[in-house]
Image (tube, rainbow, N blue to C red):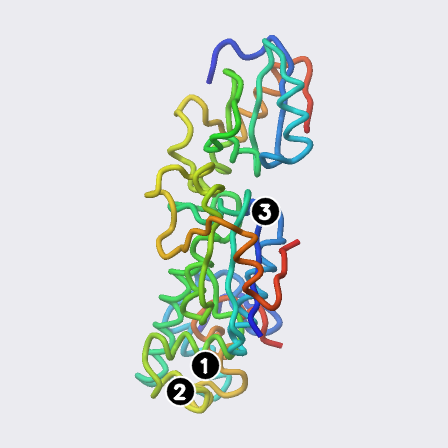
């Protein structure tokens, strides 16, 4: 069974995305194939040079970088949303697979779960 | 900070682009108004789909958290203390 | 030992900046663990992991996975880590390493 966890909300403003990240890590812990998709405002999770110390939170960029170590198979991002919020490709995290069609991607997974 | 602040309404916005309240806030702005972006709303700065008014500032710590230190000019970034000053300078405030 | 840093009801440091190797020894000794080179290798790994990812491995399974990824199969297995850090290895090791409690360890 394959699972796609979708984060479409901005980082830091709510706990929804962190809960989703926790979910994907838990799936990976039990060797369940799982991937993440960032779309809409959610692509802002993928910007480089984040530092959330000043707002008293952990930096999601750093949390997310543990995903491959834990066995999360892939991190996808909606291409349109990336172009909208991060037109400069240097400001996006590396090792992200851009997807042109969210619709096509979600049909490839048995389970698709949206955060929040 | 921009010296011409202080004549119109101060709008404090904390919703992300696309949120109904974000859209309502931007359409409620008029000529002399000032806009302060905080929390999720600072994402309006890199958003190529959003046009912001001239008198826009953003909380620096919220920019830093999101990797947007370079997305705002120095005089567009404010501290919490400067935000308090702005609220004192404006006779009318809307917190969206 | 005259000024032991404050800890919570599960033995984790209240203030991470108070950690040092002596504090680690002191916490370990409460669990009858005498820290060897092998322990220190894992402790250093965990502290580096925390600095990079701003979190402790959230569960025991992910702790084992992360160690395996960094140090290989010989060390990244639950038996080895259980021998070094009895109980719930992720929890015991994070406590000694001065890191926050793994979020998903009961």
Disc 1: CA contacts within 10 A as few (<14), some (14-19) or many (>=20):
some
At 42% from the left and 86% from the top, the residue drawn is C77
As drawn, is A105 to the left or to the right of A16? left
Q: Position of residue A111 (x, y in %)?
A: 62, 66
Residue pointed to by mark 1: C28
Q: Position of residue A47 (x, y in %)?
A: 42, 45
Residue pointed to by mark 3: A9
Q: Position of residue B26 (x, y in %)?
A: 62, 23
Q: Nearer the viewer, mark 1 or mark 3?
A: 3
Asked whether C103 or A72 is in front, the reply is: A72
Asked whether C4 or B74 is in front, the reply is: B74
- CA distance for labels 2 and 1: 7 Å
Evaluate whether label 2 is on the same chain as label 1.
yes
At 40% from the left and 78% from the top, the residue drawn is C25
At 45% from the left and 81% from the top, the residue drawn is C28
Q: Position of residue C86 (x, y in %)?
A: 50, 88
The answer to whether the residue labelled 2 contacts the one labelled 1, judged by CB atoms less than 8 Å apart, is yes
- CA distance for labels 1 and 3: 42 Å
Quarter-wise, where is residue B80 in the image? top right
Q: Chain of mark 2?
A: C
Disc 3: CA contacts within 10 A as few (<14), some (14-19) or many (>=20):
many
Q: Determine if residue C3 is in view.
A: no
Residue pointed to by mark 2: C34
């Amino acid at each position: 069974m394959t699972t796609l966890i979708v984060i479409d909300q901005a980082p830091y403003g709510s706990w929804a995305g962190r809960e989703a990240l926790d979910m994907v890590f838990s799936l990976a812990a039990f060797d369940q194939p799982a991937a993440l998709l960032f779309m809409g405002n959610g692509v802002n999770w993928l910007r480089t040079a984040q530092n959330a110390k000043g707002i008293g939170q952990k930096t999601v960029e750093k949390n997310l970088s543990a995903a491959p170590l834990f066995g999360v198979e892939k991190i996808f991002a909606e291409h349109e949303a990336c172009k909208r919020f991060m037109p400069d490709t240097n400001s996006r995290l590396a090792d992200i697979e851009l997807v042109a069609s969210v619709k096509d991607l979600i049909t490839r997974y048995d389970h698709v779960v949206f955060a929040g | 900070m921009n010296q011409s602040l202080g004549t119109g309404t101060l709008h404090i916005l904390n919703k992300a682009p696309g949120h109904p309240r974000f859209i309502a806030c931007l359409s409620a702005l008029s000529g002399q108004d000032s806009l302060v972006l905080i929390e999720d709303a600072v994402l309006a700065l890199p958003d190529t789909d959003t046009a912001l008014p001239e008198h826009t500032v953003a909380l620096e710590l919220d920019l830093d958290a999101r990797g947007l230190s370079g997305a705002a000019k120095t005089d567009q970034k404010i501290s919490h203390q400067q935000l308090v000053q702005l609220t004192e300078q404006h006779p009318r405030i809307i917190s969206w | 030992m005259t000024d032991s840093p404050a800890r919570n009801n599960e033995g984790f440091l209240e203030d991470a900046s108070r950690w040092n190797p002596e504090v680690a020894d002191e916490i370990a000794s409460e669990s009858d663990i005498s820290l060897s080179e092998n322990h220190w290798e894992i402790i250093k790994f965990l502290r580096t992991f925390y600095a990079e990812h701003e979190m402790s491995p959230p569960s025991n399974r992910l702790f084992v996975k992360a160690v395996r990824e960094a140090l290989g199969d010989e060390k990244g297995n639950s038996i080895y880590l259980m021998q070094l850090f009895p109980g719930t290895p992720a929890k015991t090791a994070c406590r000694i390493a001065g890191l926050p409690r793994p979020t998903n360890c009961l």
